[in-house]
Amino acid sequence: MSVTKWLAIGAACFAFALPTAGAQETKEYSVSTVLSADFPWGQAAEKWAELVEERTDGRITLKVYPNSQLVSGDQTREFSAMRSGIIDMAVGSTINWSPQVPEANLFSLPFLMPDDAAVDAITGGKAGEMVFEAIESRGVVPLAWGENGFREISNSVRPLASPEDLKGLKIRVVGSPLFLDTFNALGANPTQMSWTDALPALTTGAVDGQENPLSVFSAARADRANQKHLTLWHYMNDPLIFGVSKRLWDTFSPEDQEILRQAAIDAGQWEIEKSRAELVDTLADIKERGVEVVELTPEQHQAFVEATQSVYEKWIPRIGEELVETAQEAIANR
């Protein structure tokens, strides 16, 4: 065979191996969540993935891993895993990220935010920017806010309408020292455990009560775990944060960064509106299941506020006095 023919064949093979004009490599990235798509939290992550795939024509895909499976069920390790690049992205909780980002404890201060407008005043203002800056300084790029909602309290023993009613009750709480301090201040016996472990403990009576958003209470059927008394006390709200490992973020083009950010903003707003709109029906369903619901009077609510002031004295220096004051000012001016 002539040299010319060999060269022609080689050129043809090389041309065949090259991608066709306009072809783009598809890349998949992991997204961690604590809850599945049965809950608004998981739905937020799925919506983000849907929008990103749609807006990149499938060039970038996000695969959601619910139930903290990327960190073997330990949700408090999610932030560290993302910072180190083990996890690409997450729709995470301020509570779960607070061990690594003390400023995120702002949202766990008891009875700081009385309503949705107060939450929005913080997340949409200077205080929210300060929290985002603190997160990014620790290796994760925050893109947008979502919502897990106000956390209410339930138990299997008695209705709760005053701090005295909590005395001695064993209450499951998440793995945050601030939560321990809050429930100790109220005279309860707080016990830290994962949600996976909590349901069996509630069912057997090893633990008396728990605190969670209504959406979690309902979807997890906490009423089947002996949670027959529910008090709407709005003691804290747990915003969700759409975040990306900074190591990964820096590899994206500015155009792709903007797509990821805007998709997160849109998914977060969609999830916030959806979860808030569903609360009335969710509460009605809970009542239909035979759960006794206590709604506090202003005077009863104030008693809980006063009983937890020691938490502020201890935690404001850790969170940052300027941040707390900025948040309080935003709430006052909402």
Image: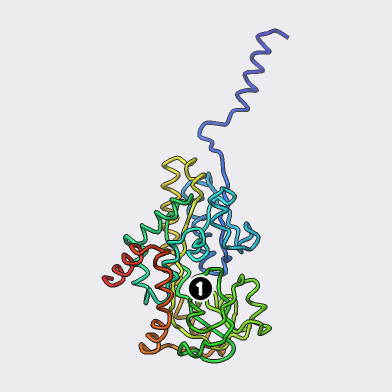
The quadrant where residue 125 appears: bottom left
Q: Does 56 appear above or below 205?
A: above
The quadrant where residue 254 appears: top left
Q: Does 128 appear above or below 209?
A: above
Which colour style is shown? rainbow
- Quadrant location of the N terminus? top right
Nearer to the camera, 4 or 199: 199
Amino acid type, label 1: Phe
Nearer to the camera, 79 or 38: 79
Residue 220 in picture, x, y percent from top left: 59, 76
Numbered disc 1: secondary structure: helix
Residue at image position (53%, 53%) is 89
Residue 228 in picture, x, y percent from top left: 57, 88
Nearer to the camera, 255 or 227: 227
Name the outermost residue toward the top.
Answer: 2
Residue 155 in picture, x, y percent from top left: 56, 85
Residue at image position (44%, 63%) is 104
Nearer to the camera, 47 or 96: 96
Residue at image position (65%, 9%) is 4
Mark 1 highlights which residue? 179
- The local crowd at label 1, few if under 14, some if 14 to 19, many if 20 or more residues have their Cα within 10 Å, is many
Residue 149 in picture, x, y percent from top left: 46, 72
Name the outermost residue toward the left.
Answer: 333
- Quadrant location of the C terminus? bottom left
